[in-house]
Image: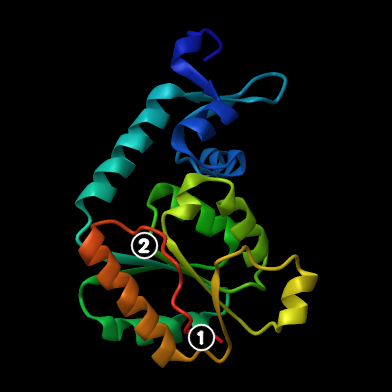
Amino acid sequence: MGNEPSADIMSTREAANYLDVSVRTVQLWVENGCLQAWKTPGGHRRILRHSVEEMMEARQTRDSTSEFFEILICEDDDINCRLIELQLSSLGQGVRIRTVSNGFEALIRIGERCPHLLITDIVMPSMDGIQMLDALQKITLGHTMHIVVVTGLNEDELKQRGGLPVGITHFSKPVPFTQLLRLISIYMEIRHVYGKPERVKEPLLAN
């Protein structure tokens, strides 16, 4: 590995810039075996360029051929997660749902395949929703999907944690599913018309 030509390897930051994700997301992909890499004696990660290019190619292919409206649910409470899944199933067979239990997992999944909609809690282990949303604001992927926060925190508690990024729709728990489903239906119609999950001004439906 030490004799790899420099053209065939990338640093963590170079890979992050190429894939348009955060450095931390690339580090997580390396740790999870999604990218082929090794560490130098000095502790720096070196990533095989072809591994990065293959991930980009696979991601672009999936994004251009997806027939589904894809939703990622980030919720650490199994009961709440299943309840949201059950309610969303009423949207029909054109919806594909994935679930994760914390912000770290969400960043990994979003980098692998960006959903049309992210529904996330705030209070979670490892990386909470505020930290995840802050990370997403720094990369292009974070601006190409709709984001809805569902939380039991009140406005003051949210502010104490740093607050939500501007333009993020949020609902208070218990989730008002009638409003949430209506909002998602609007997002699905937007995708049908425009052909991609462009960020638009959020309808004023949230609490």
Q: Earlier in the sequence, mark 2 or mark 1?
A: 1
Marks 2 and 1, Cα distance to the nearest angstrom?
23 Å
| Residue at image point 48% right, 40% down | 33
| Residue at image point 52% right, 7% down | 3
| Residue at image point 59% right, 30% down | 13
- Please provide percent x and percent y for residue 165: 62, 63
Label 2 packing within 10 angstroms: few (<14), some (14-19), many (20+):
many
- Please provide percent x and percent y for residue 78: 52, 80
Of circles 2 and 1, the one toward us is 2
- Please provide percent x and percent y for residue 46: 56, 23
Q: Quadrant of the C terminus?
A: bottom right
Secondary-structure class at tag 1: helix
Q: Amino acid at mark 1?
A: Ile
Q: Amino acid at mark 2?
A: His
* Residue 128 in view here: no
Q: Which mark is residue 79?
A: 1
Q: Which mark is residue 116?
A: 2
Secondary-structure class at tag 2: loop
